[in-house]
Amino acid sequence: MEEQKDLHKIKLKQVERSFPTTKPKKNIVPVNCPSCNAAPAKEDINIHDKIAKCGSCATVFSFDQEVKHLVEKNEKVEQEDVVRPAGIEKSYFHDELELTMKQPTGGLWIVLVFTMAFFAGLFYIVHIKEGIPFYWSSGFLGLALLSYYKYWNSPNDKIYMTVDEKILSVQYRPQYFEKDKMIRSQEIDQLYVKTVASNYFTLYAVVNAPEGQKHVKIIKYLETRNKARYLEREIEKYLGIEDRRLPEE
């Protein structure tokens, strides 16, 4: 029995390793001759001294600055990484990045519960005093109960984001009048977070579409800046986009 438990733990660990939490970075330094731009043969590259010899024009050159730039760039990315906040799930499936989070709809439904209940009570009083039809009161009571059901079920309302080399898609389930968004990954130039109010944030994408550059709202409401920045960084890392600050931020 103990052996079966140990075997089960080993299998779980293997499954966890097969779904990495971070897509591997591409650390590549192109080494080309500064005189003729030819790539030297691998036997003419001294990786320890960061010196190479061009086989075409016999120029000896250093690529130390290129290596330093790569190291500084990776250190900057690591320093700016945002820890995954609670409420966002991340996984990879067939090299497709999947990000899932709860829709921030609960507060809206509880407001509607009290609003509909207030009107149900108001029309019930008017029904008793003025004799208006009772269906006004019962109708608002039904809407109050429906809103309460939606509030109770709101933890199951999700936003699904998937990113691969071709498409970034955003789907709200249930939709609640939110259309699915589909953006070509190759057209995404940058992502940024815009502070809409003191208590919520919006995630945008700068898209270089055939008709010209435009700013597309990906997710219009995120309750914390940390969540918005995390989504921005994960998508940019996956697509290999270098983060830069924009005037709209």
Image (cartoon, grey):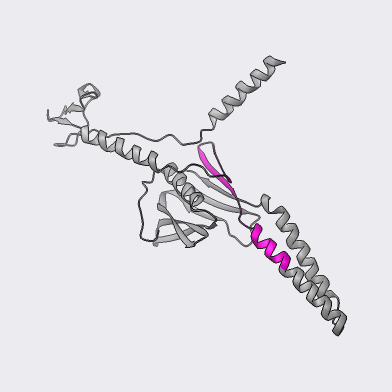
Name the quarter where the N terminus is drawn: top right
Of the pair 135 and 188, the residue shown nearer to us: 135
Q: Is residue 103 magenta?
A: yes
As displayed, is residue 75 above or below residue 17? below
Residue 105: give x, y in percent of width and height.
63, 58
Indicate the quadrant where residue 180 lies: bottom right
Of the pair 176 and 81, the residue shown nearer to us: 81
Q: Say whether residue 170 is left or right of residue 115.
A: left
Residue span colored magenta: 86-114
Residue 138: give x, y in percent of width and height.
83, 71
Residue lying at the far bottom in this picture: please name it.
Answer: 130
Which residue corresponds to the image point at 82% horizontal and 81% vertical from the top-left? Answer: 126
Q: Is residue 54 magenta?
A: no
Residue 125: give x, y in percent of width and height.
83, 78
Indicate the quadrant where residue 44 lies: top left
Name the quarter where the C terminus is drawn: bottom left
Q: Say whether residue 95 is left or right of residue 34.
A: right
Which residue corresponds to the image point at 63% horizontal and 22% vertical from the top-left? Answer: 9
Q: Say whether residue 247 is left or right of residue 180.
A: left
Which residue corresponds to the image point at 49% horizontal and 48% vertical from the top-left? Answer: 231
As displayed, is residue 147 above or below residue 79? below
Which residue corresponds to the image point at 46% horizontal and 46% vertical from the top-left? Answer: 235
